Image (cartoon, grey):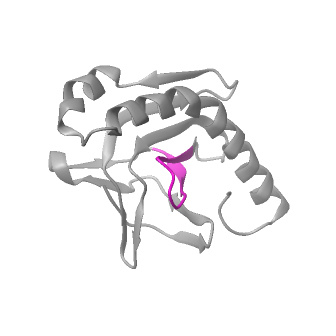
Amino acid sequence: MRLEAARSRDPGGVLVYAPVGFELHHESRGAVFRMGHQAYIAFFPGCWYSGGPDVDGDGRVLEYYWNVQTPAVFEPSRIWQYDLELDVRCSEDRTCEVCDLAEFKAGRHLYPPGWAESAYGRSRRSGRTCVRLAGRCSRRRASGAGGACP
């Protein structure tokens, strides 16, 4: 996916602000997805996920959405990764679910050895971890601290 938006960068990662209408370019599907809400998307070096809170026009959290992927590659004009078709969605009450298991199972034969097992294991653990990270990001924003969460 190719991302184009305002970003905050520090050695610990990149935090992308995605306004309403933000475009996610899914290269392998030849599709462009336009967001109907605001979001903050955190990318961390070496991590097999990205994501953060989806928020409404008043800044209230709608849900936390995390994408299971290969570690992001940071380039001057884009961030890209290989989407492993698994997503973790967590409601504000911290109830989480792994989504898109059928897509993942259908495409897992296309991944190099080890990716599928690694992605599935990460998705099952990432709900709690991602909500905890999102809480840290929210506290850092509220306190005025800069940069992305570790």
Give the left or right position of residue 58, taking residue 103 as reference. right
The answer to whether residue 38 is magenta is: yes
- Residue situated furthest front in the rendering: 113
Name the residue located 15 percent from the left edge and 50 percent from the top edge: 30
Quarter in which the N terminus is drawn? bottom left
Is 27 situated above or below 74? above
Is 94 situated above or below 38? above
Q: Main secondary structure of the magenta part?
A: strand
Residue 77 lies, in percent from the top left, at: 36, 76
Residue 93 lies, in percent from the top left, at: 70, 24
Name the residue located 33 percent from the left edge and 33 percent from the top edge: 116
The answer to whether residue 48 is magenta is: yes
Name the residue located 63 percent from the left edge and 66 percent from the top edge: 12
Name the residue located 35 percent from the left edge and 25 percent from the top edge: 100
Give the left or right position of residue 28, taking residue 133 as reference. left
Quarter in which the C terminus is drawn? bottom right
Is 143 situated above or below 90? below
Residue 25 lies, in percent from the top left, at: 27, 55
Give the image quarter of residue 147: bottom right
- Residue situated furthest left in the rendering: 30
Q: Nearer the viewer, residue 62 or 78?
A: 78
Is 117 situated above or below 55? above
Which span is picked out in magenta? Answer: 37-52
